[in-house]
Image (cartoon, rainbow, N blue to C red):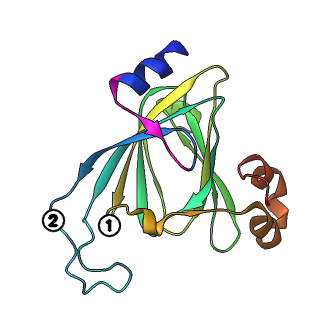
Amino acid sequence: MYDRKSELIQLLNLQPHPEGGYFTETYRSEEKLSGTEATFPAGRNLKTGIYYLLGSDDISHFHRIKSDEMWHHYEGSSITIHLIQQDGLYRALYLGKELSNEQKPQLVVPANTWFGVTVDEPNSYSLCGCTVSPGFDFIDFEMAGRYQMLQAFPEHSEIIRMLTKPSV
């Protein structure tokens, strides 16, 4: 089953993602924001979409973006999306197909929420899709620094150490 990860990387032309894992953009709307919105500049695409692949040996490090991000599960292991909200509350969301086991095939990570992802099954992978609105732009992408996260949320030190790179 794990050979499927390599196959998907090749078939879907996936590239390494800065947060960890692999991705490729599949959609960027032609329609753009007018500029009357306070949070996003004129010319921002309304929606974007990607394939996102994470192996159980990969880490999706804590990061955040300025838009809501909707996740869709396609195949492979279920995943846990670890969130630390702006008020410091930790939540775990379970993306997968086992509805009777608290999993959902589609979930939303709210804008400006720190989040990282782990694959639930060892020696596995998960192929997901992510839809962002307003559309994703790397200018809105912020990787979490371990030191800063530990200072802000010391009560979540275990998950922060697991899903951040060591501070330099």
Assess disc 1: are there few (<14), some (14-19) or many (≥20) residues with their C-alpha within 10 Å of its C-alpha.
Answer: many
Which of the two discs, 1 and 2, labels the residue nearer the N terminus?
2
Say left or right for 57 vs 28.
right
Quadrant containing the C terminus is bottom right
Q: Is residue 105 above or below residue 56?
A: below
Q: Secondary structure at mark 2?
A: loop
At x 15% / y 60%, what residue is drawn? 30
At x 73% / y 52%, what residue is drawn? 165
At x 75% / y 66%, what residue is drawn? 149
Q: Secondary structure at mark 1?
A: loop
- Which labelled disc corresponds to residue 134? 1
Residue 105 visible? The answer is: no
> What amino acid is at disc 2?
Glu
Q: Nearer the viewer, residue 76 or 145?
A: 145
Which SS does the magenta portion mostly show?
loop
Q: Which residues are magenta?
A: 11-18
Q: Nearer the viewer, residue 152 or 3?
A: 3
Residue at the left extreme? 30
Residue 142 visible? The answer is: yes
Q: Position of residue 50 (x, y in %)?
A: 35, 45
Quadrant in which residue 155 is drawn: bottom right
Residue at the front extreme? 168
Q: Position of residue 126 (x, y in %)?
A: 51, 30
Q: Position of residue 37 (x, y in %)?
A: 30, 83
Circle 2 residue? 31
Assess disc 2: are there few (<14), some (14-19) or many (≥20) residues with their C-alpha within 10 Å of its C-alpha.
Answer: few
> What amino acid is at disc 1?
Pro
Say left or right for 51 vs 151.
left
- Which labelled disc corresponds to residue 49? none
